[in-house]
Amino acid sequence: MLAVFVGGRALAAEPWWPEFHGPSRDNRSRDTRLLKEWPKDGPKLLWKFSDCGKGFACVSIAEGVMFTTGDFDDDLMVLAVDLNGKLKWKSPNGRAWKGAQPGARTTPTYNDGVVYQMNAHGLLTAFTAATGKPLWSVDLKERFDARSGGWGFTENVIIEGDMLLCTPGGTKGRVVALNKKTGATIWANTDITDRAAYTSPIVVTHGGVRQFITLAHETILSVDVRAGKLLWNHLHPSTCDQNVTSPIFHDGAVYVTSGHKAGGRMVKINADGRGVTEAWFGTDLDNCHGGVMLLDGYLYGSGCRLYKKGLVCLEFATGKTLYNAREIGKTSVSYADGRLYCLGNDCSMSLVDVTPQRATVVSRFMPPWENKPPCLSHPVICDGRLYIRHLNELLAYDVRAGH
């Protein structure tokens, strides 16, 4: 197996997808030599694991193991499943979510032999990756007066150096940094007034400043990772409490989008990293939660199906809409080897060739799901395999060319 390189540094010589949307949080697999089209019934199914519990989490992959989460009756469980689809361990992390859209939300984040997971009620726990032994837990509601909306806490936490960064959204800590080894508070920002939404953050460097960027309930905001101080914020209100999709950073600018005609906007960060100017706003790409890809200066993602949107393509620099491929429908998107991998809301799986001129469905099949739609998880492509999740079911497909 080849090592994965990020920023010129070798990360691993084994399958490596250590957190939500991968090692760079851009949802782009570095795999090559993959099938350019699939057989009618789909690529080869390697195995099916049907005991994930109820949930919408993706998988993270490290140490030859996949990590995910699921609700089992009254308990949220963090699971480790080996690459042959066999359960390795299962450890509890508080209560299951039985509110709006019941089921586990977040994908465990792997770092230095530890996996970290925030449950829907704001309980954050670190587990030994090899055994599932809990190392520490923090109740974000107790420590930071954490507050979320009606969909619960859905943030996939991020590790930066020795810090774990997350968004409790509470009066005692809107955005916080914890010691990743102990859970102790390093800093807690209380200058921010906006509460948490459902977004998973990114960390970037701009203007010589390392910035934690996320989408809160009403604003895009950025915090200085080292100092814990607010660098900038900008209004981005939701129309129905659904600020979910992760921000995209490119060429000194940040793009965000929300569903149900809330739309998307791009803001340019000032040269010193301490302010922004809005460049454009539009409602054509109003992504709910399926993710958006940036490829060669163009954005691709599903608009809200209530308004007859399919896969929408925008020009990043201008916000100009290039097309709306309604036939593709509402989908969660990932990318590998020149193709979009689209796990549809209708539970279908598609391989899509996209250019700024058109989107072409190259292959489409219906996996052997036992559960009915909608399917809300994001696909993962890692080490020549496609992993897809729907509620309690996890499927692995071989998508390598020549096999």
Image (cartoon, grey):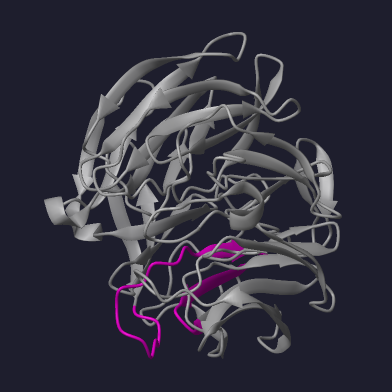
User: Residue at coordinates 34% horizontally, 28% vertically from top-left?
Assistant: 265
Q: Nearer the viewer, residue 273 or 135?
A: 135
User: Residue at coordinates 21% horizontally, 38% vertically from top-left?
Assistant: 284
The secondary structure that dominates the magenta segment is loop
For the record, the magenta segment spans 366-393
Q: The C terminus lies in which quarter of the figure?
A: bottom right
Q: Position of residue 103 (x, y in %)?
A: 45, 75
Q: Would residue 166 be seen by someone viewing this image from the given angle?
A: yes
User: Residue at coordinates 70% horizontally, 66% vertically from top-left?
Assistant: 61
| 300 left or right of 378 in image | left
Q: Would residue 403 be seen by someone viewing this image from the given angle?
A: no
Q: Nearer the viewer, residue 342 or 126?
A: 126
Q: How many marks?
A: 0
User: Residue at coordinates 47% horizontally, 74% vertically from top-left?
Assistant: 97
In the picture, residue 141 is in which quadrant?
A: bottom right
Question: Which residue is most to the left?
Answer: 307
Q: Position of residue 376 (x, y in %)?
A: 39, 67
| 204 left or right of 42 in image | right
Q: Position of residue 290 (x, y in %)?
A: 39, 55
Question: Which residue is most to the top?
Answer: 271
The answer to whether residue 92 is above or below residue 181 is below
Q: The N terminus lies in which quarter of the figure?
A: bottom right
Q: Position of residue 269 (x, y in %)?
A: 52, 16
- The answer to if 35 sits in the magenta stretch is no
Q: Nearer the viewer, residue 74 or 172?
A: 172
The answer to whether residue 110 is above or below residue 318 is below
